[in-house]
Image (spheres, rainbow, N blue to C red):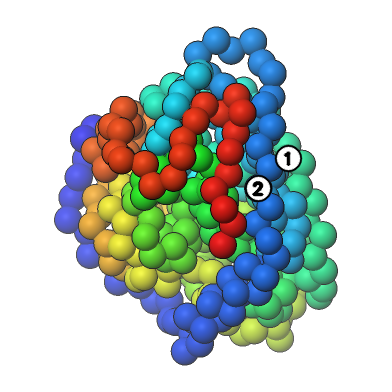
Amino acid sequence: MRGESAAVDAPTTQTEPADFDRFWATTLAETRRHPLEVTVEPRPTRLTAIDVFDVTFRGFGGTRIHAWLRVPHGARGPLPGLVQFFGYGNGRGHALRDLRWAAAGYAHLVVDARGQGHGDTDDDAPDGGPSAGGFLTRGIRSPHEYYYRRVYADAVRAVEALRRIDIVDPARVGAVGASQGGGIALAITGLVPDLAVAVIQAPFLCELDRAADLSDEFPYSLLTQYFADRRIDTAAALDTLRYFDGVNHAKRATAPALLSTGLRDAVTPPASVLPAFTAYAGPKQIVLWPYNGHEAGGDLDEENALDFAAEHLAPGHRPTATHPTGALGAPHLSEET
């Protein structure tokens, strides 16, 4: 493993709501009342080694979520699969963005963070209340209205959608991501009990009880602005954040996980990342980059990620399929449950 490894013991200061598990069980039950309705359509490109598909499925509130699926050209399943969200302000991006995982033999599902950046999914759920003008504080007055309630529920549905595509081995599906995407991947580990693996780089949305004190950088600066503007609402906002803190989701994780952080990261400071690693309940490993910021290990992190995922998901291995498999030129979906 490239980079520095060290024993880490960084206790959290975050607390956990008594109804944390009930809140998320209710949220996911409400989300699953809407049929998943996965669609998979070929997206023509000039690529010769990778096939791209435009995927949609129903997320929180029945919103149709858009994603790109990339697989090795002409691949027949079952393939290991990975779900990924990008950093803060980003949707799924262009169809040709980030081809590394498909090139390495995975079914790679890159999902819109609803309402963000270069994506195609609207955030059509009313959240109400004041904010500091960004996703991090949208609906923060209540966990039921908070923006990331919808996103985390969408992320769980993304795992379910990927598992329904016949070319994917449902037992070998994991989550990857960096920054906001890392925070969402961390939430997935706590909300999907049978996840196969997680690769989490410089995760956002951790140690949220003191993130505004640890970082003056955007987007945590939005919390500072909200707390300054809404002095008497600070306690309610901090209570909301407890339901979404990666630390509390990490406590419920079982999947093998690789985390990384740059020790000079001012955006997602190591003082926010290391407590999440310490709390992580599954098998875990962390790589530290002493002289790097939010980029952490950069391409070396990506190389580590490929090695770690291959160790746990074995791309190229062909286990006995539990459902019919075929090439995605004519995609099939397993029966909806």
Residue 259 position, x and y percent, is 33, 49
Residue that appears at 29% across and 39% down: 319
Viewer-nearest residue: 180 or 322? 322
Q: Is residue 144 left or right of residue 285?
A: right
Quarter of the image where one finds residue 129: bottom right
Image quarter hosting the C terminus: bottom right
Q: Is residue 36 above or below residue 290?
A: below
Residue that appears at 39% across and 25% down: 104
Q: Is residue 123 left or right of residue 193?
A: right
Quarter of the image where one finds residue 146: bottom right
Residue 228 position, x and y percent, is 70, 72
**Badge 2 element:** loop
Viewer-nearest residue: 68 or 283? 68
Residue 227 position, x and y percent, is 67, 73
Residue at mark 2 to residue at mark 1: CA–CA distance: 18 Å
Residue 322 position, x and y percent, is 38, 47
Q: Which mark is residue 104?
A: none
Viewer-nearest residue: 334 or 280? 334
Viewer-nearest residue: 161 or 102? 161
The residue under label 2 is which amino acid type?
Val
Residue denoted by label 1: 119
Residue denoted by label 2: 38
Q: Which residue in the rendered view is the most extreme toward the bottom?
A: 18
Q: Is residue 215 above or below residue 223?
A: above
Does residue 204 appear in the picture of this structure?
A: no
User: Of callouts 2 and 1, which one flags the residue occurring earlier in the amino acid sequence?
Assistant: 2
Q: Which residue in the rendered view is the most extreme toward the left?
A: 7
